[in-house]
Image (tube, grey):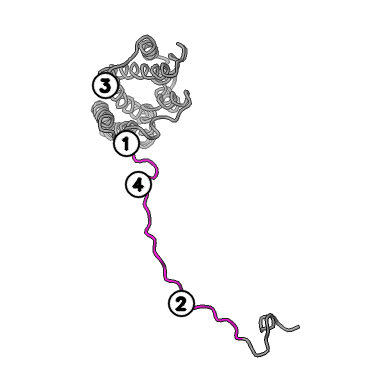
């Protein structure tokens, strides 16, 4: 079941990458490139950082073939309509939890502590979309202005880290998939976003401090002292 969700996520992100290529009117090479990057970029980053041998996306032909199939779907079909959009959102949300949990589990298995393992899980889940957005010259969508996406990956990775430490990796995978999918879909439906810069600024109250009532005493002038001949001018 987890493998099915994994490949479903690869296909969905391949389609989403191809959809970006369609928006930019790219040729088939652009479709394949963006589809492969979107679908497999996070896993490639994960395996490269962990240094556990060749990336799985290169050793298992199902991954690369599924990503290219997503590119073909986006190239030949105009994916419009409410239900098509909803199916893609749900499939992508399921993949976020699956990939986050997989990345976290692999990082823990090679001996990393829980915090870098959670980071690897998040990179696995959102790394492909980041590379895709950078490749087409735009700010990655997870950096703000959009509904919660990376947040679901963080929650899923944390759940996997906890349950993996308790010896329940399968439970962690299931919990991560369900939680990330729920958070991501609800965020899309209700428009949940993280606050941006300036929205939660803390303004310190202004306080008028009392001015000192004393003033420095000026030296008294003596009779006959004109301008420039006071005691401060000195004697020649």
**Residue 213: which disc?**
2
Task: Tell me: residue 15, above or below residue 151.
Answer: above
Q: Give the magenta part as a residue range.
A: 194-220
Residue at 34 percent of width and 41 percent of height: 195
Mark 3 or mark 1: which comes first in sequence? 3
Residue at 29 percent of width and 25 percent of height: 93
Residue at 38 percent of width and 27 percent of height: 124
Contact? badges 2 and 4 (CB < 8 Å): no
The picture quadrant where one finds residue 188 is top left
- What is the spatial separation of the Cα atoms under label 4 and label 3, in whole angstroms? 32 Å
Task: Tell me: residue 16, above or below residue 232.
Answer: above
- What is the spatial separation of the Cα atoms under label 3 and label 2, in whole angstroms? 71 Å
> Is residue 207 part of the magenta span, yes or no?
yes
Reading the image, the residue beneath label 1 is 193
- Give the crowd class for mark 1: few <14, some 14-19, many >=20 residues within 10 Å: some
Reading the image, the residue beneath label 3 is 86
What residue occupies the far bottom of the structure in this picture? 223
Q: What secondary structure characterizes most of the magenta part?
A: loop
Quadrant containing the N terminus is: top left
**SS category of the residue bearing label 1:** loop
- What is the spatial separation of the Cα atoms under label 3 and label 1, in whole angstroms? 19 Å
Closer to us: 4 or 181? 181
Mark 3 or mark 2: which comes first in sequence? 3
Mark 2 or mark 4: which comes first in sequence? 4
Closer to viewer: mark 2 or mark 4: 2
């Amino acid at each position: 079941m987890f493998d099915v969700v994994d490949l479903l996520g690869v296909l969905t992100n391949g389609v989403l990458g191809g959809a970006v290529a369609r928006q930019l009117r790219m040729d088939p090479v652009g479709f394949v490139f963006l589809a492969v990057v979107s679908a497999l970029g996070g896993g490639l980053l994960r395996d490269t950082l962990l240094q556990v041998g060749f990336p799985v996306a290169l050793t298992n032909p199902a991954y690369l073939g599924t990503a290219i199939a997503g590119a073909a779907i986006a190239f030949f079909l105009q994916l419009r309509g409410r239900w098509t959009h909803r199916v893609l959102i749900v499939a992508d949300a399921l993949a976020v939890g699956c990939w986050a949990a997989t990345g976290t589990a692999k990082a823990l298995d090679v001996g990393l502590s829980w915090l870098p393992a959670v980071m690897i899980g998040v990179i696995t889940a959102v790394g492909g979309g980041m590379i895709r957005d950078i490749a087409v010259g735009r700010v990655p969508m997870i950096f703000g202005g959009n509904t919660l996406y990376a947040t679901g990956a963080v929650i899923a990775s944390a759940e996997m880290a906890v349950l993996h430490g308790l010896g329940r990796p399968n439970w962690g995978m299931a919990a991560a998939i369900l939680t990330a999918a729920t958070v991501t879909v609800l965020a899309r439906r209700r428009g949940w976003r993280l606050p941006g810069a300036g929205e939660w600024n803390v303004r310190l109250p202004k306080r008028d401090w009392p001015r000192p009532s004393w003033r420095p005493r000026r030296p008294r002038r003596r009779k006959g002292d004109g301008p420039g001949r006071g005691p401060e001018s000195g004697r020649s």
